[in-house]
Amino acid sequence: MSDMDREFSTDADAVILAAGGFPSHRVPLLALEHYRDRIICCDGAADALLQAGFYPEMVIGDGDSISPGAYNKVSDRFICETEQETNDLTKAVLYAVSRNYTRLLILGATGLREDHTLGNISLLADYMDQAVVGMLTDYGVLTPAGGNMVFPAYPGQPISVFCMDQSPLTMRGLKWPVENRIINRWWEATLNEAISDLFEIETTGKVIVFQGYHRK
C-alpha cells in the first residue's frame, strides 16, 4: 500500500488547487502527481502550479490574481467568473461537479490568511451535499461528515471534530469518547486520538473531521 493510499482514497475524479499555501507535505504532493491530468486550479494558484511543473485542466477565477505570464500559458483553459457571491474555490468545485467529477480532493486551501483558511474549511460542509470531498493540508485530511460514519485510522492518530451546528455528537473508538453531546464551541471536540484502526462519528447534523497524517 502506498503512502497516499494510507492517507486517503485514490479513487478521486479530480484535484482542486486553491490559492492558499502551495502544498509541501508528501501526501498532497503525491495527490498532485497522481491526478496531474485532472487539476482544476483557482487563478490565484496558477503561478505556483506552473512553477511546480504541473499544468491545469482548467483555471477558474476573476483574473485578478494571476500573473500575465501565467495567464498567457493557460488562456486557452481559463474560465473568467466575476460574480462575488462565491469564492474561487466554490467556483472550482461547481465547475468540477458540472463535469460530473463527484469525488474531489482539495489542496492548497490553508496555510496563508487565517480568515481564508477558516472559510475554506467551513465550505466543506456545503460541498458534501454535491460531491464526496476531502481537503488535504500539510498536516492531515479534513473530511465533512454526517449521519453515522466509520473512519479508518491508526492507534495514536490525531483526531479533531468540528461541529457545524448544534446537533448531538457521538464519537466512539477515540481516547476521549463523546456520547450524544451538544458541542457549543469548535475546540470542545478537538485534540483527540484514535485508539485502534477505526473510529465512529454519529450525528444528525454536519461535522468536519480532521485526521493527522501517519507519523514517520
Image: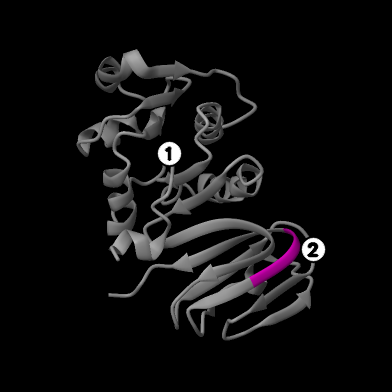
**Quadrant of image for the N terminus:** bottom left
SS of the residue under disc 2 = loop
Q: What stretch is highlighted in magenta?
A: 201-205
- State the image coordinates of residue 190 (x, y, percent, origin top left): 59, 72
Mark toward the start of the polypeptide (1 vs 2): 1
Residue 123 versus residue 62 in the image, above or below:
below
SS of the residue under disc 1 = strand
- State the image coordinates of residue 95 (x, y, percent, origin top left): 52, 27
**Which residue is pictured at 72% across the width and 74% down the height?**
170
Whether residue 106 is visible, yes or no, is yes
Give the label on residue 33, or none: none
**Quadrant of image for the C terminus:** bottom left
Residue 120, by quadrant, is top right
Q: Nearer the viewer, residue 92 or 200?
A: 200
Real-space Cα separation, disc 1 to disc 2, in angstroms: 30 Å
Q: Which of 50 and 195 is in front in this view?
A: 195
Residue wearing tag 2: 167
Residue 66, by quadrant, is top left
Give the label on residue 16, or none: 1
Q: Nearer the viewer, residue 203 or 208?
A: 203
Q: Which amino acid does label 1 sit on?
A: Ile
Residue 173 highlighted magenta (yes or no): no
Residue 39 versus residue 136 in the image, above or below:
above
